[in-house]
Amino acid sequence: MAKANWVEKTVRMNKRGIIKYQLVFHCFVNDLHHSEAELDCLALLGLYGECDMAEFCNLVVDENIFKVSQTVRNFLIKAEKANLIEKNGKSRKKIKLSQSLNIQTEGNIVLNYKLFYVEA
């Protein structure tokens, strides 16, 4: 039987932090590279749920994540191409995190990931 070094940790996080952690994990596993500001932007979207795009861009600027709303819009285009967000509507677009990410944002959230490496 193979021996393994086992690490177990329990950490209490705020809601925005645990949403961001899930996004960081998803991006790491799928080799997606995003800046801290981009991850903060996605975590904020997860916290608010489905939002009007224009209002969300202003919120991100108000939170000092990005300096101007055009930068937010540019990132949202990039995030949509990477299937991180979904856009709906024509004139007043609504945005939200993509359901395919399976990011938990409601109620009590407990994450239980099991990662392993096996030597040959």
Image (spheres, grey):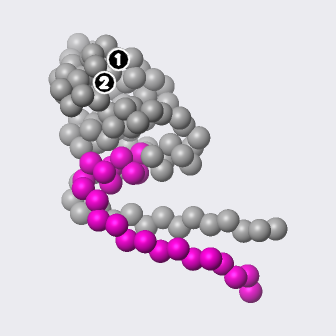
Span shown in magenta: 1-23
State the SS at label 2: loop
Q: Is residue 95 left or right of residue 35?
A: left
- Residue 27 x %, y %: 50, 43
Would you name the residue on which mark 2 appears?
A: 66
Would you name the residue on which mark 1 appears?
A: 71
Residue furthest out toward the right: 120
Mark 2 nearby-residue class (10 Å; few <14, some 14–19, many ≥20):
many
Q: Which mark is residue 120?
A: none
- Mark 2 in CB contact with mark 1 (< 8 angstroms): yes
Amino acid type at mark 1: Thr
3 relative to 25, above or below: below
Q: Is residue 85 visible?
A: no
Give the residue drawn at x 34%, y 17%. Answer: 71
Mark 1 nearby-residue class (10 Å; few <14, some 14–19, many ≥20):
few
State the SS at label 1: helix
Residue furthest out toward the bottom: 1
Return the disc, 2 or 1, that comes first in the chain's sequence.
2
Between circles 2 and 1, the one closer to the viewer is 2
User: Which residue is nearer to you in this view: 17 or 111?
Assistant: 17
